Amino acid sequence: AVCLSVSLRSSQQHVCVSGRAAASMAEEAKKLAAYAAVDNHVQNNQVVGVGSGSTIVYAVDRLAERVRQEKLNIVCVPTSFQARQLILQHGLTLSDLDRHPELDVAIDGADEVDAELTLIKGGGGCLTQEKIVAGCAKHFIVIADYRKDSKALGQQWKKGVPIEVIPMAYVPISRTIAKRFGGEANLRMAVSKAGPVVTDNSNFILDWKFEHAQNWKEVNTAIKMIPGVVETGLFVRMAERAYFGMEDGSVQFRDAPIN
């Protein structure tokens, strides 16, 4: 019994260490992708859309570093409360779409990226403002670690497509999506708050767990037409290039197919 307990403990310890190592490798990969995107796509006198999520933290770090070192004149437009806080904490110039409705470049993360650069976004709940800002940018660049790279949507990301909805309509929308497209659309519940997640726009989020590959352009349009749907986390033909930080410390990129 003692031997068993020792071997169990040591194996648990081993799992812990390898889990930590994997997490730190993923963080390093995020940083590599973020730095590559900021270095390759941000120039002096630009208006930059700043995405949301864990990977974008590294992009803002690098952007602030370059602004200081190279004395760049950069204006930043946020995609969320989190992005706004990051911009202010780093002493960068904060603006909005009222003052800068046209952006030179937007940089953002993704939950999954397929072979054609169709994205699932919204794991952090900021999909609507992210899509608005990306749509205002001349160039939309995606940054991610190796875990987000897929041949087809749903291979890596198992939490479904986020859909932002008007609160009063979440039940009929959920039923309509399941009936028309299969799978199930569940209300996203909050973790450190009782009840559902509430977005920066005071809406709810449904996570649609789809059963099979779809024509994402058609599905995106069809879901958007359901009354009460604000926006979907499907970004179709929007991203120009995606950077992936890899496990071996390299950075790979993929360009969108030419339509």
Image (cartoon, helix red, strand yellow):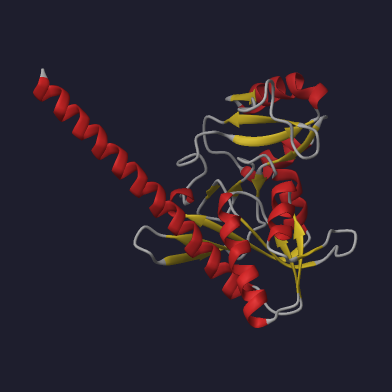
| Residue shown at the point (68%, 42%) measured from the top left | 218
Q: Position of residue 171 (x, y in %)?
A: 74, 19
Q: Position of residue 8 (x, y in %)?
A: 19, 27
| Residue shown at the point (62%, 75%) measured from the top left | 66
Say which quarter of the image contains residue 155: top left
Q: Position of residue 188 (x, y in %)?
A: 64, 27
State the residue in front, 84 or 196: 84
Say which quarter of the image contains residue 221: top right
State the residue in front, 112 or 73: 73
Q: Residue furthest right?
A: 98
| Residue shown at the point (66%, 42%) measured from the top left | 233
Q: Is residue 254 above or below residue 83?
A: below
Q: Is residue 37 above or below residue 178?
A: below
**Horizontal arrangement in the rendering, residue 20 relative to residue 106 (left or right):** left
Please state the total of marks drawn on the protein image: 0
State the residue in front, 210 or 62: 62
The N terminus, quarter of image: top left
